[in-house]
Amino acid sequence: MDSAKKILIIDDDKRLHERVREFLQANRYECASLMGGGAVLETLDVFRPDIVLLDVMMPGEDGFSVLLKIRGESKVPVLMLTARGEDTDRIIGLELGADDYLAKPFNPRELLARIRAVLRRSEPLENTRDKDEVDDSSSALHVAFSSGMIRRGSYILDTKRQTLTFGSTTTSLSTAELCLLHAFMTRAGTVLSRDQLMVLAFGSDEHSTARSIDVHISRLRALLRDLGETASRIRTVWGSGYCWIEE
């Protein structure tokens, strides 16, 4: 799998570019580099990366602005890198559409593990599982997203096109949004804890946190409101977790 994967590195640190590129190429990834985000859209179109490594603290246009540009045109997974590890930066990145976040300085092996985890989450897989099963192992990541349409009331989740339709309105989904919606809509009416959601949506990824689940839920609720939902479709069950409420 890894030999065919392409990684775009966007960072103003030339030495970091060289070290990361050398390490990733040694692990059979193809890399391209940008020293800033000015040509990011053209590079996405030509290079077509499978994942983007994006620095937050760059002179001029910062990583958050570049992330907004990327999300305006592409659902490519983005792993943000920064010398600032504060929760505020992490939450902002997640809210803007980042798939993961890694603070500098980092161990190259941790970077590789994060890249592989994000790439696993971004790929539809073929094996299905019992929709009522809530497993606490990483194999839960392999829930099939190739099954087609999932319908719940006025909602249609298209797992192949990675879209959600409500009435006559359709919107594209990020990988995290698709994974969480799949978990909720195949278990409508069931209260899911944060830990269960991390397993179901992210394969028990050790880098996912309860706080990041809350951020993703907040983004999902905003997405549903933008589609025209007036009810609280994803309900907070205090002390337990979250539940998709049937219409």
Image: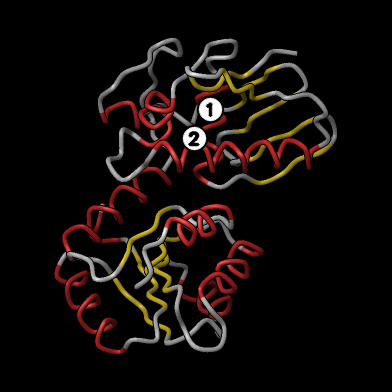
Residue 214, x across and y down, in percent: 52, 37
Residue 172, x across and y down, in percent: 66, 46
Residue 214 lies, with reference to residue 101, above or below; the image says above
Element class at badge 1: helix
Q: Is residue 37 left or right of residue 106?
A: right
Nearer-the-camera pick, 117 or 136:
136
For the point 70% across and 23% down, which residue is it?
233
For the point 30% across and 89% down, which residue is it?
14
Residue 216 lies, with reference to residue 7, above or below; the image says above
Mark 1 neighbour density, 10 Å: few (under 14) some (14–19) many (20 or more): many
Nearer-the-camera pick, 153 or 211:
211
CA distance for labels 1 and 2: 5 Å
Which residue lies under the disc numbered 1?
182
| Among the 4 quarters of the image, the one containing residue 32 | bottom left
Mark 2 neighbour density, 10 Å: few (under 14) some (14–19) many (20 or more): many
| Among the 4 quarters of the image, the one containing residue 65 | bottom right
Q: Amino acid at mark 2?
A: Cys
Which residue lies under the disc numbered 2?
179
Residue 89, x across and y down, in percent: 48, 62
Q: In the rendered structure, find residue 20 and report the number of the disc placed on it.
A: none
Element class at badge 2: helix
Q: Is residue 232 left or right of residue 102?
A: right
